[in-house]
Image (tube, coloured by chain):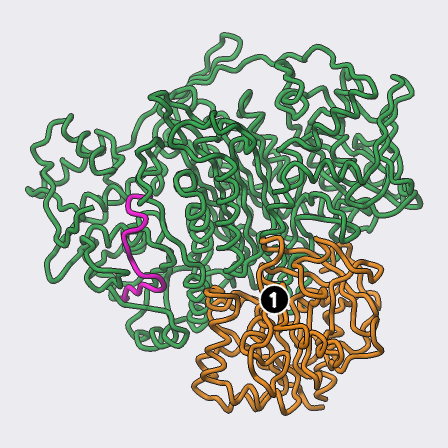
Chain colours: A green, B orange
């Protein structure tokens, strides 16, 4: 790269359409022709060419990453079902689905919805909890360690930058990778091996998260070859914030203070490059370099400054760097920035590089003049660099100066509202799903299949990952990601609960975190994928004791190229599912993020990833003493299945293993499910439930086996007692992934009280916990019996990923 | 009654200071998080406190080696004061990164010597390990150790560990013998029945399964496991506790607070 220290004008006034496109591609602006023409039009009015600083500023501000152009743009949508066509135009898909549901539900305990760096819901009378999940896919594909580390570093700053700053309490991580067992010869040229990506992504999250002292308590990993060249890395952070620190205030005359890391050439074009397909030529310089200790120091000191009310607003430097942060803060006032005052890692940066660099660990604070001295002293005391670089004005203009020269001068209104709305076409052809040919299995087949499913990459233990994360730092993780009755055995917890006793004196309340993710359903039906992910996230939370009436959701879309109408159509369907389910469950979305253009090219051919909607759920629990874990507790206790099992095999782990092409994807029945969830909460609070586990990937047989080996117990299940709807073989009953089901363990004497609570719901007693440590599933009717040692199943579950 | 005052020393990268503070507070002490810069500015402030705690974390990112940079900083800028405090017999504890700091500045195994003669190195698994383990208390082997922090604990307790560099290695066999002879080895990793464990119950491969040591006098104590993360039963994976609701960590912090009183 050439060392440019000055700014230059970019010829745009007299360019043809073709030349405008060339300019956009050459400078990694990721702007469309319409957008380039809007810029041309604006500068023709000013009768001058833009500077490089100006054009880069516009590109960052208008990037898909910052502006969500697709989801807020115009979409002409056509849905085809049984050769009937329905057309609909969306002027802003987000506002007409997910956001609309939140507005209609209008929960008074939602304190900040879709407007700040994170969503905030009420924790108690004085505090709120903030939650945000981000994606860092493109960087993690190029440089997995740095990509994932700065992914977690970035979302932590979102939490520091919400309101006047929240204190982070927990992290979550969800990954989608290619198959780590793939042969080297099958890896496309220039791509990393999936196993290398897995190891480095985990190491990145581990090193950053652990050093920040934030426990990583929840997550999921999904393996599919569709993510080989374009892995997905979701990072989330939850924090606690006093209610009186939620509002930001920017006044004309306030000073701009940049705090934390220095600015360098790392992460140039991060925001804009995320809208471009990956290939061998992708520039690794777009990936940022992280230093967690610098961020930890910022966290420690900034929250002190917050509590002393030394600043009026804050935001993080994320995508687009200072350009986005100051552009946002100064939107209503205007701002002037002296770029030569920004502390640099090294010399030689051009003004535009300083302005858009995504160097890490930087926060921008808005400081009233009177606090100028005090705030800098506070940071200095703990060796944190804090430098004033400009101030907010009254002129509603963005002015940038470098060594006395004006290098940019634009109207804030053009920067924020000058973008033309793109129009895209979307189409969705809904296919009919047919029940597969009946799946028959002998006792031996069933045993074998159970072990195959338990050892499947998407079901097996993720202990290798979880134990590298310090998931107990801060001492508040009272429902853990791995749960075992004994220290030596463990099973997968459904959700984690954080009990913030070190921060909120005398509290009994807890915060539950969970997620739902089902890309295999999305390959067939994205509506059902979205609905199932929402329900799964809720079930996971309810299984540990969450109150389903006090929950909020986050959406994270990772999709392929939205210029392809079918891909965009599948996204519209998923967004509609979010609206429908949010309304039906009466649970709002409070924040979200989308990452589109997850597309890569191999040998000139383009591939889009299988679409993924990650749903993250957060809830407040009234009393942490009333939470439960999933391992079976005592011999002789009774086992109940809540909910009904349907013949829903499509997209299941069984379908993958047995290569079954037909089948129905699990449907969500929100009314039935919510009723069960409400009553579980009641039963847990009446101390009637000993253990509870959500039933999802792999079906009943997996959920029950996990409860047995996590408790180091045996279990005997009568398959004939399971409540089913429609025709199901034994195999279909055991491996179907129908929504709405939970397994619970009850002390025999509590049975009648338990039955009273669930009167009117579908449920059945199906067996009991035994002391012989064998897992037994038996059907007298079909004369089949599965019998396996509990410890053996634990071994099978643990062995797949043990590196 | 006199309130026992605890200094929780923090620096860049400290991250277990809140829960350590709360742990002492749960034992009715008054605890204060103090940044090392402010202690260096006013060195004698240390003598206003009854107990000194070095909490867990990644001081200065554990660059060079875990705890090394902070150990040097303390030794060079606060060495005399820290030594004097320790020799006065007041309780001092180093947990996880804090233990690494104590060992690397040489306050352990012997503050009189104040020289590094042992280390904590990378786990045998070469991985960060976050898990619960069993500990055999010295009482199980000998009658009682001098350690004021671990009085009245049962033979076997459970605590969580979370570290990548926890393998304790003494300089030589002579030192190991001495530590044994003087009852300075307070905790060893163990099985549930007090037997020698294998990985993962032996999480790091420490020499003689050493998990925590104290000085000969018994007031300076360092350990890799985290007692501050097990103050009450809900924090245990199976939610077990002693006396119905407490964690073993509570007993450890209470011992020190009671000692001062």
Looking at the image, residue B128 sits to the left or right of residue B234; the answer is left
Tag 1 secondary structure: loop
**Is residue A453 rendered to the left or right of residue A264?**
right
Quarter of the image with the C terminus of chain A is top right
- The subunit letter for the residue under badge 1 reads A
Q: Which residue is under mark 1?
A: A504
Residue lying at 54% horizontally and 31% vertically, measured from the top left: A179
Along the line of sight, which residue is nearer the eye, A658 or B103? B103
Residue A260: within the magenta? Answer: yes
- Residue B20 lies, in percent from the top left, at 62, 72
- Above or below for A740 versus A247: above
Residue A751 included in the magenta stretch of the image: no
Answer whether residue A752 is visible to the viewer in this image: no
Hey, which quadrant is residue A602 in on the image?
top left
Residue under the point 34% across and 37% down: A64
**Residue at 68% in and 21% down:** A648
Estimate the x, y position of residue B244 in percent, counting from the top left.
Answer: 83, 65
Image height of A9 relative to B131, above or below: above
């Amino acid at each position: 790269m050439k060392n440019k220290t000055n700014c230059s004008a970019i010829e745009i006034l007299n360019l043809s359409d073709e030349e405008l496109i060339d300019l956009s591609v050459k400078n990694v602006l990721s702007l469309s022709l319409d957008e380039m023409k809007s810029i041309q039009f604006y500068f023709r009015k000013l009768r001058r060419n833009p500077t490089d600083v100006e054009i880069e500023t516009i590109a960052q501000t208008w990037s898909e990453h910052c502006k969500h152009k697709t989801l807020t743009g115009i979409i002409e949508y056509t849905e085809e079902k049984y050769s009937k066509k329905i057309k609909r135009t969306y002027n802003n898909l987000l506002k007409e689905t997910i956001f609309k549901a939140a507005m209609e539900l209008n929960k008074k305990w939602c304190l900040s919805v879709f407007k700040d760096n994170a969503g905030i819901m009420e924790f108690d009378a004085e505090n709120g909890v903030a939650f945000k999940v981000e994606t860092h896919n493109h960087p993690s594909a190029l440089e997995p360690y740095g990509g994932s580390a700065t992914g977690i570093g970035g979302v932590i700053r979102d939490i520091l930058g919400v309101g006047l700053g929240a204190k982070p309490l927990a992290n979550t991580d969800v990954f989608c990778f290619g198959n780590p067992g793939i042969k080297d010869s099958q890896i496309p040229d220039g791509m990393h091996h999936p196993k290398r990506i897995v190891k480095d992504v985990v190491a990145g999250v581990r090193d950053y998260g652990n050093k920040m002292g934030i426990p990583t308590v929840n997550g999921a990993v999904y393996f599919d070859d569709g993510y080989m060249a374009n892995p997905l890395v979701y990072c989330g952070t939850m924090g606690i914030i006093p209610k009186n620190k939620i509002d930001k205030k920017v006044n004309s005359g306030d000073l701009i203070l940049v705090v934390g890391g220095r600015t360098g050439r790392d992460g140039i074009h991060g925001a804009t490059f995320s809208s471009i397909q990956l290939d061998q030529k992708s520039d690794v310089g777009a990936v940022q370099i992280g230093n967690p200790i610098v961020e930890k120091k910022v966290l420690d000191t900034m929250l002190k400054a917050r509590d002393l009310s030394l600043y009026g607003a804050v935001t993080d430097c994320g995508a687009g760097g200072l350009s986005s942060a100051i552009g946002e803060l100064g939107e209503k006032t205007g701002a002037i920035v002296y770029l030569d005052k920004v502390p640099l890692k090294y010399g030689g940066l051009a003004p535009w590089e300083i302005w858009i660099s995504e160097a890490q660990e930087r926060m921008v604070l808005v400081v009233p003049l009177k606090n100028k001295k005090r705030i800098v002293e506070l940071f200095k005391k703990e060796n944190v660099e804090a430098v004033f670089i400009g101030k907010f004005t009254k002129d509603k203009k963005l002015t940038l100066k470098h060594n006395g020269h004006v290098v940019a001068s634009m109207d804030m209104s053009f920067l924020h509202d000058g973008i033309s709305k793109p129009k895209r076409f979307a189409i969705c052809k809904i296919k009919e799903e047919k029940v597969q040919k009946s799946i028959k299995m002998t006792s031996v087949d069933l045993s074998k299949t159970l072990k195959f499913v338990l050892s499947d990459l998407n079901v097996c233990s993720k202990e290798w990952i979880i134990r590298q994360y310090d998931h107990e730092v801060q001492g508040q993780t009272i429902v853990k990601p791995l749960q075992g009755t004994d220290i030596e055995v463990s099973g997968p917890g459904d959700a984690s609960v954080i009990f913030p006793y070190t921060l909120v004196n005398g509290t009994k309340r807890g915060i539950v975190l969970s997620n739902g993710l089902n890309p295999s359903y999305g390959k067939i039906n994205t509506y059902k994928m979205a609905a199932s992910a929402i329900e799964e996230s809720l079930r996971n939370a309810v299984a540990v004791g969450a109150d389903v009436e006090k929950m909020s959701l986050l959406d994270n879309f990772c999709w392929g190229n939205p210029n392809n109408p079918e891909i965009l159509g599948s996204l519209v369907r998923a967004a509609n599912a979010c609206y429908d389910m949010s309304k039906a469950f009466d649970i709002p979305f409070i924040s979200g993020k989308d990452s589109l253009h997850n597309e890569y090219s191999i040998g000139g051919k383009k591939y889009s990833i299988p679409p993924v909607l990650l749903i993250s759920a957060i809830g407040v629990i009234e009393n942490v003493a009333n939470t439960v874990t999933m391992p079976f507790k005592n011999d002789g206790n009774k086992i109940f299945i809540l909910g009904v099992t349907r013949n829903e095999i499509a997209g299941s782990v069984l379908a993958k293993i047995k290569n079954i092409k037909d089948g129905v994807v699990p449907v969500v029945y929100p009314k039935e499910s919510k009723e069960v969830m409400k009553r579980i909460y009641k039963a847990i609070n009446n101390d009637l439930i000993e253990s509870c586990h959500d039933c999802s990937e792999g079906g009943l047989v997996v959920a029950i086996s996990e409860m047995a080996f996590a408790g180091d117990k045996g279990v005997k299940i009568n398959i004939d007692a399971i409540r089913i709807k429609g025709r199901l073989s034994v195999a279909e009953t055991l491996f179907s992934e129908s929504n709405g089901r939970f397994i619970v363990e009850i002390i025999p004497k509590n049975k009648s009280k338990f039955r009273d609570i669930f009167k009117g719901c579908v449920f059945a007693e199906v067996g009991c916990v035994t002391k012989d440590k064998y897992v037994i599933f038996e059907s007298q009717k079909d004369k089949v019996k599965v019998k396996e040692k509990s410890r053996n199943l634990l071994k099978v579950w643990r062995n797949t990923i043990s590196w | 009654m006199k309130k026992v005052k605890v200094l929780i020393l923090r620096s860049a990268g400290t991250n277990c200071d809140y829960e350590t503070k709360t742990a002492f507070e749960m034992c009715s002490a008054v605890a204060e998080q103090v940044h090392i810069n402010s202690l260096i500015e006013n060195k004698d402030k240390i003598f206003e406190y009854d107990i000194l705690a070095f909490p867990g974390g990644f001081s200065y990112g554990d660059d060079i080696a875990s705890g090394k940079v902070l150990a040097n900083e303390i030794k060079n800028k606060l060495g005399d004061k820290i030594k004097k405090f320790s020799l006065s017999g007041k309780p001092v504890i180093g947990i996880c990164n804090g233990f690494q700091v104590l060992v690397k500045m040489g306050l352990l195994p012997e503050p009189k010597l104040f020289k590094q003669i042992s280390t904590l190195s990378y786990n045998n698994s070469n991985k960060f390990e976050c898990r619960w383990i069993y500990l055999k208390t010295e009482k199980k082997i000998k009658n009682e150790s001098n350690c004021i922090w671990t009085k009245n604990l049962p033979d076997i307790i459970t605590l969580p560990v979370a570290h990548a560099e926890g393998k304790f290695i003494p300089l030589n066999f002579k030192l190991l013998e001495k530590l044994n002879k003087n009852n300075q080895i307070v905790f060893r990793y163990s099985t549930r029945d007090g037997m020698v464990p294998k990985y993962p119950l032996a999480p790091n491969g420490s020499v003689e399964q050493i998990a925590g040591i104290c000085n000969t006098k018994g007031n300076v104590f360092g350990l890799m496991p985290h007692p501050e993360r097990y103050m009450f039963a809900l924090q245990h994976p199976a939610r077990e506790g002693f006396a119905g609701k407490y964690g073993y960590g509570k007993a450890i912090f209470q011992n020190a607070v009671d000692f001062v009183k």
